[in-house]
Image: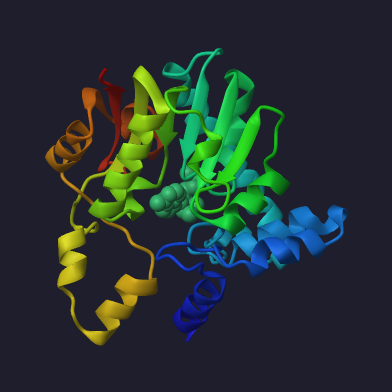
Amino acid sequence: MVKSLEVAKWFVSLGKEPQNYLGAKWIPALLRRVPESGRPLWALRILSLSPHYFFDHDNPKYRGMSNTEYLEANFDAVTKSRENIYEKMLSRYLDANDTVLDYGCGPGFLAKATAPYVRKIYGLDLSLGAIECARIINSAENIEYIAVGKDGLDAIPDGGLNAVYSFAVIQHLTNEVFEIVLKNCYRKLKPGGQLLLHIQLNDETWKSEEEFRKDRSAKGRVKFKIGLHCFGRTEQEHIEIVSKHGFEIVEIKKLENFFTEFADEIRSQRLLVARRGD
Ligand SMILES: C[S@@+](CC[C@H](N)C(=O)[O-])C[C@H]1O[C@@H](n2cnc3c(N)ncnc32)[C@H](O)[C@@H]1O
């Protein structure tokens, strides 16, 4: 019952493309109608309709809280987690003069954490609703949020970026979409520009795209169509697909090297660092 409610929530917020949670056009329209003072809380409420954000209401640390208290506490927790990601990981790769793209920025927590330390950030996401929420809860003077479909990639100059980073995104992409993302990154990066991809290797809990697709039962097909895609790939598969698109692999680092405190949870996660060839 709870699961059906969850799926119904995702479904009403879906845009036209698969995986486009909060992509429905009613979301930005609604947020623009809310009085400005109420928009941040409404943005958090909207975000909790998606499987990507604010989905751990049952965590004992939120026990006894009202929904508003939970959303605000979770906002603080995600803000801190993204500050930690910038400090321990991205800060090693980005410079103060860099123009950077956050690919799949969602509601902009990591872009906001990174913005004080670079020249400019473009935050790009498939979802119109996530981008509208980012503009409300995570804006900064040097961040420009862009929805892939609406504003489009043309807002970013070709060959204009020093770096592209993408966190918690690649595992949600089919190979077909991953290749489109890599083509876009190649086009927007300067020659020699850095590509920083957070990746998930397949292990006993992370199935491959092929395994997902094999389930041809009615439930399996609905799951593939509207459920959240979560695919693992081998290190070699990542290397091949990234290299095929004109990037030279620099290093693949275990995420636990950056975040020793979460070593058990992130054992199969890596940071793939590559450079755009000429
Ligand atoms: C788990 S969220 C991560 C958000 C953010 N990177 C973070 O770490 O807080 C994954 C995001 O990827 C976005 N996404 C999925 N497919 C995409 C695509 N093809 N192009 C751009 N964004 C995409 C989703 O809309 C979602 O906001």
Can residue 65 be seen in this snapshot? no
Residue drawn at x 68%, y 66% is 64
Residue 265: % across, % down: 34, 46
Q: Nearer the viewer, residue 144 or 249?
A: 144
Q: Is residue 97 left or right of residue 158?
A: right
Residue drawn at x 29%, y 83% is 219
Q: Nearer the viewer, residue 141 or 81?
A: 141
Counting the numbered discs, the total is 0
Residue 260: % across, % down: 37, 31
Residue 22: % across, % down: 56, 63
Q: Is residue 90 left or right of residue 257?
A: right
Q: Tell me the quadrant of the picture where the C terminus can be found.
A: top left
Residue drawn at x 74%, y 61% is 31
Q: Is residue 112 left or right of residue 152?
A: right
Q: Is residue 266 above or below residue 67?
A: above
| Residue 80 occupies quadrant | top right
Can residue 57 be seen in this snapshot? yes
Q: Nearer the viewer, residue 139 or 187?
A: 187
Residue drawn at x 21%, y 84% is 217
| Residue 89 occupies quadrant | top left
| Residue 58 occupies quadrant | bottom right
Residue 116: % across, % down: 64, 22
